[in-house]
Amino acid sequence: MIEKVDVIIVGAGAAGLMCAIEAGKRGRKVIVLDHANKAGKKILMSGGGRCNFTNYSITPENYISHNKHFCKSALSRYTQWDFIELVKKHHIPFHEKTLGQLFCDHKSHDIVDMLLAECDMVNVDVRLNAKIDHVEKPNDHHFKISSNRGHFHCQSLVIASGGLSIPTMGASPFGYKIAEQFGIKVWPTRAGLVPFTLHNDDKDKLSILSGIAIDSIVSNDRQSFRENILFTHRGLSGPAALQMSSYWHPGEELIINMLPDIDLVEHLKIAQQQQSQKQLKSIISDLLPKRVAEIFLDANISETKLASIAHHEIEHIAAQIQAWSLKPNGTEGYRTAEVTLGGVDCDAISSKTMEATNIIGLYFIGEVLDVSGWLGGYNFQWAWSSGWAAGQVV
C-alpha cells in the first residue's frame, strides 16, 4: 500500500521538526521519518544537556559557507527573537550564559517536548526507526519513497538529515547521497567545532596541563577568537580552540595569546624595577596557573631573579606566552565535532524557499547544507530559520 501525503521530511532534528510545524500550520499533511529511536537526539545532548538553542546576536558573519550571502534571507525572516518567543510561549525558563548564548535552565528535553507539542497541534506524524531504502522522482509532480515504515508518494521531499558529526548519534551521509542522486553538487565535508590533537612531542609536554582552562586569544591569518582554551589529555579544546578549528587547515599554525589583557613585556620591565629580587616563575605564576608557568618558561631562566634578565630575554619570554605558536597534528574528527563543514552546494538551492533550483519539490535544510555556524547557538538558529523558510512553501 502506498500512502499519499503532501510532505515527507527526512530527519526529526531541529530543522526537520521546525519545517514540519510550519507546513502543518498551513494544513499540509506531513510525515517526518527518522532512523533514530528518539526525535531530536542531537538537541537532547547539546549544550551539556541544556541545549544552547540560539544566541542574542545572530549575524551572517557568524556562518561559514562557500556562498556567504545564502544564509541572509532565512536568518532575517525567522530570527532569534522569533524562536525566543516560541520558547516563552511554552514557559521554558532559560538564561544567558556568555556572549549571548541562551540555554535552558533545566534540560534540553524542554526544547524537544516543545517542538513535538507544536507538531501534535498541527497533526504532524513523526515516525521513528525509519530506514529509507529508495527515493525516486517518476515525474515532475511527486516523489516515491520506500522505507521499512511504509511506501509513500509526496509532492514535497525535505532533506533535514544533518551532517556527519557525532556518528554515535546516527549521523550519516544520506542527505549528500540524495543531492548527488539528483545531480546537485556537494562540497567536500570536514569536521568543525572540534578539539585539536597534537603531535607527540607537544602532547607529551602539555599532558600535565590536562584540565586547565585559560582565557586566550587563538588566531591564524584569517580569523581570531577570544574565549577559554582547555588543555586535555589528547590536545587542545575549549571554546576558542573549537571555534578556530572551523577556520584551520592541516599543516597550519595557530598563534595563542594566553595573557590577552596585559602587555607582558611592559609588565615584566616594571616588575624588574619594583621586585628585582623575585624569581621570574614567581611573577608569571601570579598571572597564569603555576603548572602552565612551569611548562612555558625555559628551565634555565625560570628561577632567575628579574634583575638578572636582559631585555631581549624578556621579549622572548613574552612571546612564548603571548604569541605561542602551535601546529596541531589534526582534529578529533567527526567523533566529537559539533558541526559538519561543507555539504550541499547553496548555489543550487533557493535562499528564500530552500528548494533545489533544478528539482521541483526537493528541499534541503539545516546542517546538510553548506552553512556552518559558530559555537554558541548559531547552528540551532540556522536550523530554525532554514526549517521555517521551507515550511512556508512545501
Image (cartoon, rainbow, N blue to C red):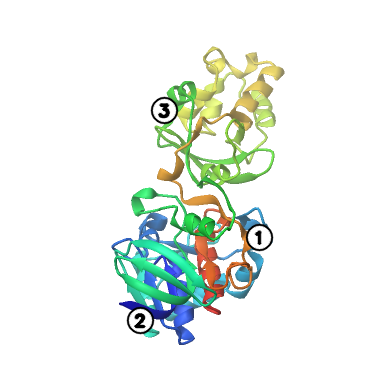
> What's the residue at 53%, 41% (across, down)?
241
| Circle 3 or circle 2, nearest the eye | 2
Label 2 CA crowd tier, 10 Å (few <14, some 14–19, many 20+): some
Q: Residue 373: image x %, image y %?
A: 56, 56
User: Is 240 on the left-hand or right-hand side of 347?
Assistant: left
User: Is 51 on the left-hand or right-hand side of 222?
Assistant: left
Q: CA distance from mark 1 to mark 2?
A: 34 Å
| Mark 3 or 2, nearer chain start | 2
Label 1 CA crowd tier, 10 Å (few <14, some 14–19, many 20+): some
| Mark 3 or 1, nearer chain start | 3
Q: Three-letter amino acid code at disc 2?
A: Asp
Q: Nearer the viewer, residue 14 or 376?
A: 14
| Circle 3 or circle 1, nearest the eye | 1
Which residue ends up furthest to the bottom in the rendered image? 27
Q: Residue 172: image x %, image y %?
A: 41, 53
> What's the residue at 40%, 69% (across, down)?
145
Image quadrant occupied by the N terminus: bottom left
> What's the residue at 54%, 34% (across, down)?
287
Q: Three-letter amino acid code at disc 1?
A: Asp
